[in-house]
Amino acid sequence: MSRPTPLSGFPELLPAERNAELYVLDHLRRVFELHGFASIETRAVETLDQLLRKGEIDKEVYVLRRLQAEEGGADSGLGLHYDLTVPFARYVLENSGKLEFPFRRYQIQKAWRGERPQEGRFREFTQADIDIVAKDDLAFHFDVEVAHVMAEALSGLPVPPLRLGVNNRKLLEGFYRGLGVDDPAAVMRTVDKLDKLPAERVADLLRAEAGLDVDQTNRCLALAQISAADDSFVDQVRALGVEHDLLDTGLDELAEVISAIGALETGSVTVAADLRIARGLDYYTGTVFETQMAGFEHLGSICSGGRYDALADDGRNRYPGVGISLGVSRVLVPLIARGQLTASRSVPSAVLVALVDEGSRPDSNAIAQSLRARGIAAEVAATAQKFGKQIRYAERRGIPYVWFPAGLESAHQVKDIRDGGQRDADPSTWSPPDADMTPAINTTAGGEAQ
RNA sequence: GUGGGUGUAGCUCAGCUGGUAGAGCCCCGGCUUGUGGUGCCGGUGGUCGCGGGUUCAAGUCCCGUCACUCACCCCA
């Protein structure tokens, strides 16, 4: 087989599909910048002790090694980053003297994980992160802000409806401690399995592995069942009759996020308190987020994050942060693969300038240049084939307009090949409608994509 | 890493208990003397993932291998 085959877990898009992705990336960038987030890019590589400093070897890090290194020689001590949060924490510490705090940044980059690929789970993928870090203390309203910005960004995406679920680990920990549980983290990890396992199984695990009694188990499950789009969840939690200071703090914080975001007009994104969310055993210390996409719940969360109070610490100063990251590849690649998302054309060109004969190429070039001067992407036909062929060239690429240069007795004409309409036009003044200036998004079926 | 599935044309697939490879779509040309899309006619294109074995004969059976894929795990 001489033709190369795809590499599993390393998705590549065709040009029209890439245009859809570019649309999404442009949108994200615009929203993030509207909210004043600065862009940074960090190197692809981190030192292994940075990547593994939480002692988690299960991150499936790709390690770098020079091809020319001696047989059996050690690796370089470097690995590709598996997310953007850890590199960001390192970047903040490294540049703490040069950054202004609170520091708000967005970062849209590739990340790599050596895990076995599956739908929506890749070895190389793009993430879009926003984070805010401060020195020593980070006010709680930033938790609200991060959720707000991401909800706004998500609401403009050409994807099925999304549900941004919010919870708070102080609430969970306080509740569990108030119940007399010794190891709240173990309970969180087990309750987190409710997505995959039936409630009875989780109950069994809570008793067997976390050592809870029947009453504790029932109340933990009852807590996890609570979900609300407004602060009515507070009363539901209170009704379970558990008391703890940390629980009070968590309830207040979560209520604040929900009431602030719930009031926003966020289109196809709904925001709700969801007390089942636990987020494994990561570095999160307060607010936590998870996002499900309608019809694609099997992908798991497509956008998650939370508050981390101790991720960056140089020994003298602490840099608490809160952030949320969107799995751009996780969302887009499955939609594209199912034909539910692509763009109207495979090229940026809005206009194909026809070529009468090879000798008149300068005339056609001049027309194209005149259009470009006004921001209209244009290309000139590759060869002076019959006009039928040139129109077909445009059609194949999704270019909406074909320009016919003026002849001895005819004026310049532009044809909209979608409806066949053709009319006289002046290269120095004609413009397509705004909607045709750049490739448009095409979405179909499988949920109400806007 | 542990299990299951699948590999035939660019794409989607057919090929019964072994008998020297097919369809639709796509693409190219013509009908159509500089204007595409519909229609009709014709055409290009495959060492049947790779290697080995059984057989007079293997896309078809056996072994191995690689790739892709699904589930577990974990997560974006």
Image (tube, rainbow, N blue to C red):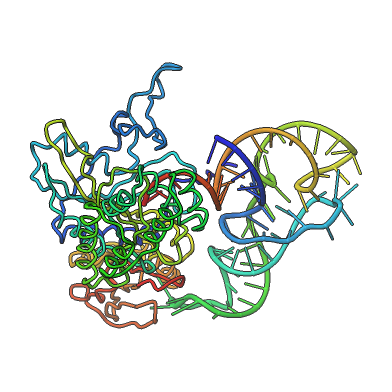
Q: Residue at x 45, y 62 (%)?
A: A296
**Is A155 displayed left or right of A139 in the figure?**
right
**Is A270 displayed left or right of A253 in the figure?**
right
Residue A216 point in image, percent of width and height: 40, 53
| Up/down of A98 relative to A277, above or below | above
Residue A438 point in image, percent of width and height: 29, 67
| Up/down of A376 relative to A216, above or below | below
| Up/down of A306 relative to A388, above or below | above
Residue A62, picture quadrant: top left
Q: Image quadrant for the C terminus of chain A?
A: bottom left
Q: How many marks?
A: 0
Residue A315, picture quadrant: top left
Q: Image quadrant for the N terminus of chain A?
A: top right
Is A270 in front, or is A185? A185
Residue A383 is at least partly visible in this image: no
| Up/down of A69 relative to B21, above or below | above
Residue A309 point in image, percent of width and height: 20, 44
**Is A84 displayed left or right of B12 in the figure?**
left
Q: Residue at x 15, y 38 (%)?
A: A318
Residue A273 is at least partly visible in this image: yes
Residue A312 point in image, percent of width and height: 20, 38
Residue A233, picture quadrant: bottom left
Is A322 in front, or is A129? A322
Is A305 in front, or is A72? A305
